[in-house]
Amino acid sequence: MNLLHPKKLLLSKWTATRPQAKEKHFLVTRVISAAPSPGLTQATLAVEAVEIEAAMSKRSQRIAWRELQDPSQWRQGWL
């Protein structure tokens, strides 16, 4: 399993292992945190999802950030 720290997700590059519609390379453009609950500061909010953008088509989609840890779907970097 990939060791991936949620704070380092923004602007990270990913390669889909099974490209669809010729979209293979992606960039994390937004990190989405869970709704704040009482007592939590902005620095301690849990990451819920990420928005990734296809490098070729610029199409964006939202996925759970932990999906990026699945080596059968994603590889870190542009390969």
Image (tube, rainbow, N blue to C red):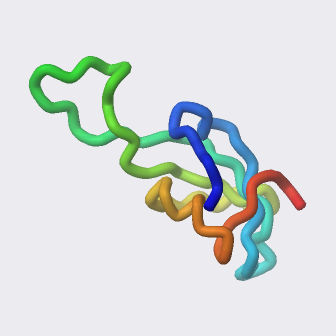
- The answer to which quarter of the image holds residue 9 is top right
| Residue 37 falls left or right of residue 55 | left
Image location of residue 75, percent across then percent down? 74, 62
Image location of residue 14, percent across then percent down? 73, 56
Query: Foreground residue, 21 or 28?
Result: 28
Quadrant housing the C terminus: bottom right
Q: Residue at x 29, y 41 (%)?
A: 34
Q: Residue at x 60, y 54 (%)?
A: 52
Query: Foreground residue, 5 or 63?
Result: 5
Quadrant housing the N terminus: bottom right
Using the image, determine if residue 23 lies above or below residue 10.
Answer: below
Q: Residue at x 59, y 59 (%)?
A: 68
Q: Residue at x 56, y 39 (%)?
A: 5
- The answer to which quarter of the image holds residue 37 is top left
| Residue 48 falls left or right of residue 27 | left
Using the image, determine if residue 32 lies above or below residue 56.
Answer: above
Image location of residue 70, percent across then percent down? 59, 68
Using the image, determine if residue 4 lies above or below residue 57.
Answer: above
